Amino acid sequence: MPLDRTSSANDQAVRPAIFFDRDGVLNFDTDYLFEIDKFVWIDGAIEAVKAANEARYFALVITNQSGVAKGLYEETDIHRLHYWMARELEAQGARIDAFEYCPFHPDGCIERYRRISEHRKPQPGMIIDLLNKFPVDASRSFVVGDRPSDIEAARAAGLPGHAFPGGNLRDFVLPLLGNG
């Protein structure tokens, strides 16, 4: 479910998108992160989002959140964190156009979330939903992830996937945007 910031998306011109994985790309992955006070931005993450904005790319987040299915937190916790992230980015002149997440996992202990989902990476469902929701030029779009499942989801959606090895995200993203 995305943070709905798409009210004017249908009125926007076709442009490329960068699909960011969240944990391990935008923030340090601390396993089942949902608490704002435990959130730490990856070096250069805010600047990478801002660079995508300035290059006129849609900045979109796709994240598996199996902690919901495992009973560790609720969807409202994800919404709260994504809202906070959006405000933090906004304060720095950056913007995420949409957050998409998958709360499902086949081994979940919460029955309504225990299932195989076409939205759980490595499946491409989150990417495809966002491609359909925004006027995206898929031929110039790509995914940045830190796990093989992110790259597999990109390929399954027909997009290139780039494995972020850590370090400064802005320095990694700039050449992909054609600004490096």
Image (cartoon, rainbow, N blue to C red):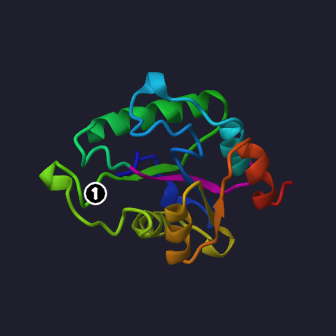
Quadrant for the C terminus in the image: bottom right
Q: Residue at x 65, y 59 (%)?
A: 163
Question: Start and end of the magenta stretch?
Answer: 54-64
Residue 125 among those drawn in magenta: no
Residue 63 among those drawn in magenta: yes
Taking depth in this image into account, of 161 and 17 the one nearest to the observer is 161
Return the residue found at the far right. 180
* Horizontal relation, residue 170 to residue 148: left or right: right
* Horizontal relation, residue 104 to residue 18: left or right: left
Query: Which residue, given by chain and number where applicable, does mark 1 sit on?
Result: 105
Asked where in the image residue 96 lies, by quadrant, the reply is: top right
Asked where in the image residue 148 lies, by quadrant, the reply is: bottom right
- On the image, the x and y values in percent for residue 129 come to 42, 66
* Horizontal relation, residue 13 to residue 174: left or right: left
| Vertical order, 37 against 41 (above or below) | above
- On the image, the x and y values in percent for residue 158 come to 56, 78
Local packing at callout 1 (Cα closer than 10 Å; few below 14, some 14-19, many 20+) is: many
Return the residue found at the far left. 111
Q: Residue at x 46, y 46 (%)?
A: 5
Taking depth in this image into account, of 54 and 26 the one nearest to the observer is 26
Taking depth in this image into account, of 135 and 75 the one nearest to the observer is 75
- On the image, the x and y values in percent for residue 92 come to 66, 29
Q: Residue at x 22, y 63 (%)?
A: 115
- On the image, the x and y values in percent for residue 149 come to 49, 64
Return the residue found at the far top. 37
User: Element at badge 1?
Assistant: loop
Q: Residue at x 24, y 61 (%)?
A: 106
Asked where in the image residue 44 lies, by quadrant, the reply is: top right
Three-letter code for the amino acid on which mark 1 is drawn: His
User: Magenta stretch: dominant SS?
Assistant: strand
